[in-house]
Every structure is written in C-alpha cells, then in structure tokens.
Amino acid sequence: MWEEETIKAAVREHYAKLTQGKSCCEPAGCGYGSSADVHLMQIGYSASELGDLPQEAVSMAAGCGNPTALSELRPGEVVLDLGSGGGLDALLAAQRVGPQGRVIGVDMTPEMIERAQESARKANAANVEFRFGEIEDLPLEDASVDVIISNCVINLSPDKEAVFREAFRVLKPGGRMIVSDIVTQDELPKFVRESLAAWAGCVGGALEQEEYLQKIRTAGFVDVEVLQKSAPMGVFPIVSITVRAVKPSITGARMA
C-alpha cells in the first residue's frame, strides 16, 4: 500500500491540474465526468443556488451531495468547510450565515485556494476566508466552529481517523457535522485500492459504510445518522451518503 504522503501528493497534483484544465482522468466518484452544472443539479443543488454564484466556483465544483442544504445553517454561525476546493459550498454557506456569521474553507491545494479566493472576491463574500492546510491537522483553534461541512473529500484522506478527531476538536460543544462522501457496499478490487488515480478519483480510499460511520462515532460524535443515500454509482460497488453527527454538549461525553 502507498505511504500517506504519496497519496496526498497524488491527490494534490490531481486537483491542481483540474484548476488548469489539464487533468486527463475523470474521477469516478467526485463528479467531474459531466458538465459541472448538470452534475451539481443531479446531486441536489438548485439552479437558483448555482445562478447566484460566480461561474468559476460552479465550473470547478465537484462533489457527491449538497451538505450545505441539509445543514440547517443559521445567521451568525461559524462554518468550516473541509476540503473547500473551488469554494462553492463555502460561498453557499456564507449566504446562509449572513454578515454576522463566518465561513472558513480549508484545502491542501494552493491552486484551489487561489481559485476560491478569487470567487469570493467576485461574489463580494466578505464573511468567507480560505486557509491552506490539511484536514488531518486543521489550522483552527479548539471549539471554534459551530458547523462542519464537507463534500466528497474525506474519502481522499489516508487517515480518516485523524480527520474525524480534528473535526471533533474544532467543533464547539453541541456543534454538528454534515458531510457527503463516497462509501462502498462491497469489497473493491485490489487494483482499485492500489491505484493512485482511483484514490484521487474518490474511489480508492472509500470505506465500507458502517466502518465509515463507526470512525465518526469513535472520534466522539453522537447521534450519527445517514440523511441521504444514492443509488449505486458506476461500475464499482460505491454509493454516496450524507451523514449528520453531533458533538455532545457536555465535553468529555465521548461515545464509541
């Protein structure tokens, strides 16, 4: 199996190329196989949502769900977007939390950060910022955000336990996490697991659904529930799920 840093480097290179329109490979799970607008509406975004955003944010967007729509965001909340990419979900969240709220996007690909920052400027979204960092080691303080969202990103991480631990750490007590991601319904072929292209395509690193949910619980989250689940996708036994989980209001009340 590949070293963690090798996987991260392959993912970073893949998404850097996407910002330049140079990728030769279409991720099977992340949604780059069709035009951005068509794909986004297929996974739950509305035409009105997309129409209010800069085209650059829409054209660079991928994903396997619309976690922002299911997050019940409220004015004034602080939202963290794990793996914010071109900024689509962060910008949508910014509209919902309003000028008194704040949205922080974290991404490990500098080119994606630049694209997202440009889209935020064009959208006049003063309540959004994008930070360079890895989701396994978030550049945020403990208990500093109300809500975490993520869209088809955690499956890219070679250390998902660390991602969920970090998410738990930065959430305020009582905070919630809503993530859309790719999971498996059966064993993936060995050649897929060992393919860096499949990792970058949101397939190679996907976990079986119950294993994925258990890692969230082990990190300390409670009330873990699947809000949405897609039909099987493509030739591999994978589906998209959107999961909601809560950090207990009483810190230390961790539950495996």
Image (cartoon, rainbow, N blue to C red):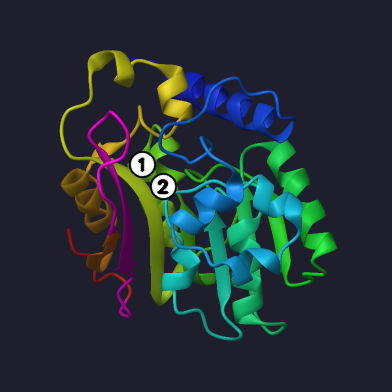
Contact, CB < 8 Å: mark 2 with mark 1? yes
Q: Nearer the viewer, residue 193 or 239?
A: 239
Please, what is the three-letter code of the amino acid marked with disc 1?
Lys
Drawn side of residue 38 relative to residue 192, left or right: right
Q: Count the marks: how many? A: 2
Q: Which residue is mark 2?
A: 163
The image position of residue 166, as x and y in percent, is: 44, 53
- Residue at the image position 59 percent from the left and 47 percent from the top: 36
Q: Nearer the viewer, residue 188 or 49?
A: 49
Task: Say which quadrant the N terminus sits in.
Answer: top left
- Residue at the image position 33 percent from the left and 80 percent from the top: 249
Specify whether residue 46 is in view: yes
Label 1's element?
A: helix
Question: Quick check: is 233 in the magenta stretch?
Answer: yes
Q: Nearer the viewer, residue 172 or 24?
A: 24
Q: Quadrant of residue 207?
A: top left
Q: Which residue is mark 1?
A: 160
Residues rendered magenta in the picture: 229-250
Drawn side of residue 213 relative to residue 156, left or right: left
Q: Looking at the image, is 172 positioned above or below residue 236?
A: below
Label 2's element?
A: helix
Q: Looking at the image, is 143 positioned above or below residue 240?
A: below
